[in-house]
Image (cartoon, rainbow, N blue to C red):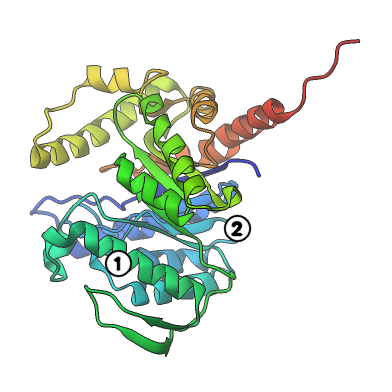
């Protein structure tokens, strides 16, 4: 199966106190639906939407937004990126994405993660000290819901379920569930032991340094007796595409740097700079920024390193203008994707014997 190419976003909005929150979110969601619709029209494979509970993002309920996108699209797969499973109810998560699956004629997926931000834990009444236990137990319940219509289940963090049916059931025989990880070996190994597809977020450093995590993933799966055929991998990265590499860098740097510096102030990172940005968009860096040929070449090169089944690009970071995002999506689908698919197809063909 050819590598899938797609996009993901958190639906960034202006968090300034002077900006009216309702109209700002309404504007972003209207534009977001246009972006998903265009991604479908230009032949991209996947669109992901991340769950956050902060003033700088509008997507606290990915399934709701993706359901709106389902009726405007035909082929593109619709996934969370991610669902913060630790602070949600797996029964409701399953029901919401089963409903999305029905509305989309079988195109829904769940990308479950522990969350890179912690706002949802106090918001929904969970203790951060239970961070790991919550995710492990809730993943166990979500998988039980995926596999059985009527379940009996017991855990420590939630009331037991005794012989209850959970509806609606999805159109797909089994709702796809991916595990999203940020580079923690334990998380990667757990995904392998469960035999679940894994999505690795790479937003800094040199991507090739993360490649051993996929080796660990496959080894953990082998030791657990999982079927290698179901072990799919994705890399999820930041980047932007424009008609020229100079334009892509100039358009993307400001909004992306503002977001990274805002998060950095919260987490104690040092500030970024244009020099850091330009180093990160070099062939060995983590940013996939440039004209279609440059980005396609980098995607293909990293596929050689990772052997990944899916590549997701986060272009709509910060306050990127909607028209620039739309042009980036158009170029991704009409220019980058054909170049990548041809290169990977050619690489998979056996060499012709010389006459």
Looking at the rendered structure, the secondary structure element under dot 1 is helix
Looking at the image, residue 69 lies above or below residue 340:
below
- Quadrant in which residue 206 is drawn: top left
Residue position marked by numbered label 1 in the rendering: 137
Q: Quadrant of the C terminus?
A: top right
Q: Are there few (<14), some (14-19), or many (20+) residues within 10 Å of tag 2?
A: some
Left or right of residue 108: residue 201: left
In percent of width and height, residue 325 lies at 40, 42
> CB atoms at circles 2 and 1 under 8 Å apart?
no
Residue position marked by numbered label 2 in the rendering: 75
- Quadrant in which residue 280 is drawn: top left
Q: Quadrant of the N terminus?
A: top right
Marked residue nearer the N-terminal end (2 or 1) = 2
- Residue at 30 percent across and 17 percent down: it is 279
Left or right of residue 204: residue 241: right
In percent of width and height, residue 238 lies at 36, 36
Question: What numbered label is drawn on residue 90?
Answer: none
Circle nearer the viewer, 2 or 1: 1
- Residue at 68 percent across and 26 percent down: it is 347
- Residue at 34 percent across and 72 percent down: it is 90
Left or right of residue 285: residue 304: right
Residue in front for this viewpoint, 179 or 99: 179
Q: Are there few (<14), some (14-19), or many (20+) residues within 10 Å of tag 1?
A: some
Residue 254 shows in this picture: yes
- Residue at 52 percent across and 38 percent down: it is 308
Looking at the image, residue 18 lies above or below residue 214:
below
In percent of width and height, residue 143 lies at 43, 68
Looking at the rendered structure, the secondary structure element under dot 2 is loop
Residue in front for this viewpoint, 10 or 137: 137
Residue 38 shows in this picture: no
Residue in front for this viewpoint, 118 or 343: 118
Question: What's the CA distance linking mark 2 and mark 1?
Answer: 33 Å
């Amino acid at each position: 199966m050819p590598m899938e190419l797609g996009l993901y976003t958190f639906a960034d909005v202006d968090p300034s106190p002077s900006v009216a929150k309702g109209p700002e979110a309404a504007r972003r969601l209207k534009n977001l639906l246009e972006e998903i619709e265009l991604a479908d029209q230009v032949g991209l494979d996947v669109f992901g939407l991340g769950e956050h509970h902060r003033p700088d993002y509008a997507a606290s309920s990915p399934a709701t937004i993706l359901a709106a996108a389902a009726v405007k699209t035909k082929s593109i797969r619709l996934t969370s990126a991610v669902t913060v499973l630790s602070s949600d109810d797996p029964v409701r998560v399953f029901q919401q994405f089963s409903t999305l699956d029905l509305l989309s004629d079988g195109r829904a997926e769940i990308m479950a993660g522990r969350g890179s931000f912690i706002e949802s834990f106090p918001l929904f009444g969970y203790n951060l000290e239970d961070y790991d236990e919550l995710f492990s137990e809730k993943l166990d319940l979500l998988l039980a819901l995926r596999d059985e219509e009527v379940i009996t289940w017991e855990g420590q963090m939630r009331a037991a379920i005794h012989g209850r049916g959970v509806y609606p059931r999805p159109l797909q025989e089994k709702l796809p569930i991916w595990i999203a990880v940020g580079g923690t070996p334990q998380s990667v190994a757990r995904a392998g032991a469960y035999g679940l597809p894994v999505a690795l977020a790479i937003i800094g450093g040199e991507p090739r340094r993360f490649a051993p995590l996929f080796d660990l993933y496959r080894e953990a799966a082998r030791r657990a007796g999982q079927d290698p055929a179901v072990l799919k991998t994705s890399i999820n990265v930041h980047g932007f595409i424009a008609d020229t590499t100079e334009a892509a860098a100039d358009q993307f740097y400001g909004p992306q740097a503002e977001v990274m510096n805002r998060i950095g102030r919260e987490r104690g990172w040092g500030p970024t700079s244009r020099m850091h940005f330009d180093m990160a968009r070099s062939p060995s860096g983590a940013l996939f920024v440039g004209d279609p040929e440059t980005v396609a070449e980098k995607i293909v090169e990293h596929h050689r390193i990772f052997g990944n089944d899916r590549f997701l690009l986060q272009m709509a970071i910060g306050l990127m203008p909607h028209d620039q995002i739309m042009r980036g999506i158009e170029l991704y689908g009409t220019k980058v994707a054909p170049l990548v698919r041809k290169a990977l197809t050619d690489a998979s063909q056996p060499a012709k014997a010389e006459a």
